[in-house]
Amino acid sequence: MTEAFEICGVPSEGGVLIVADHASNHVPDDIDLGISPQFLNDHIAFDPGTAPIARLMTESSGYLAILASASRLVVDLNRFADEPSAIPERSDGVEIPGNRLTEEQREARMGRFFWPYHDRIDSLIADLKPALVLSLHSFTPALRSNPRLVRPWDMGILYNEYETASRLALQFLDKEGMLNVGDQLPYSGKQLNATMDQHCEPVGQPYFGAELRQDLIMEPDGQRRFADILLRTCDKIRTALA
């Protein structure tokens, strides 16, 4: 593990690479965000459930994961480097005064967390040539900033220009039964897909994005359930793409 990322699993060529941009809510001791500690357990700080699910999946042969080691409030890795929201000053109605940085401070933060993480993803894809990349996130059923917004899906599948693996995922998940799966929901990968847009789209790397509803994956049973669902889905996609 480094300050920027953690690697789980055993590297193997032609396997599945899991990318979890928001796996951790850790804030280093030398960074003061200026927010109440309660928000570090909130969805604005990380994607609850994604780290244990990724670790469970990497217990299977051929699965490797890269997990962010720092909170998305320190740096949001699923953004482009020049986006102001890469170091957010506000998230779901919460002000983050400690992120009002000078340009020099911003560059130092990005050099410490953002670039090492993205450079490692680049090298993993180049070296391992995975059959599939899974972009793993989770979403909150309700937003403080828009409490009337209904987000009932158990899982959402996201993509941008490359759709093949996502279409297969939707097909296979439909056969799982008893799952409410959103196509480009709870939001669209056409608008928010930065990590995959940077690392997969330009090189024709097969990928799909999975958003899991957080209240379904907070406990070990739910984490195991969705890890198994994703393992089955990824294996079927790998076979279909071969």
Image: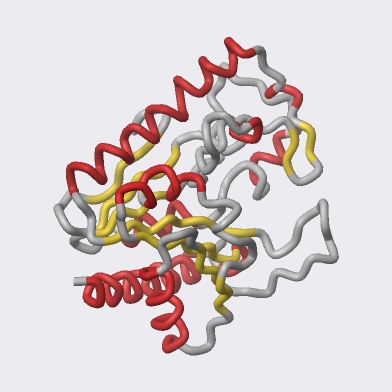
Which quadrant holds the N terminus? Answer: top left
- Asked where in the image residue 181 lies, by quadrant, the reply is bottom right
Which quadrant holds the C terminus? Answer: bottom left
Q: Farthest left residue?
A: 13
Q: Indicate how the structure is coloured in the image.
A: secondary structure
Instruction: Report x, y in % for residue 140.
Output: 66, 59
Position above or below: 198 against 56: above
Position above or below: 28 against 83: above
- Asked where in the image residue 38 lies, by quadrant, the reply is top right
Position above or below: 43 against 222: above
Instruction: Report x, y in % for residue 15.
Output: 21, 59
Q: Residue at x 48, y 89 (%)?
A: 177
Circle count: 0
Instruction: Report x, y in % for residue 182.
Output: 58, 74
The answer to whether residue 154 is left or right of residue 63 is: right
Q: Residue at x 83, y 61 (%)?
A: 147
Which residue is at the front of the view, 229 or 170? Answer: 170
The answer to whether residue 37 is left or right of residue 212 is: right
- Asked where in the image residue 97 lies, by quadrant, the reply is top right
Position above or below: 121 against 103: below
Q: Residue at x 76, y 56 (%)?
A: 143
Q: Residue at x 31, y 55 (%)?
A: 204
Instruction: Report x, y in % for residue 230.
Output: 38, 70
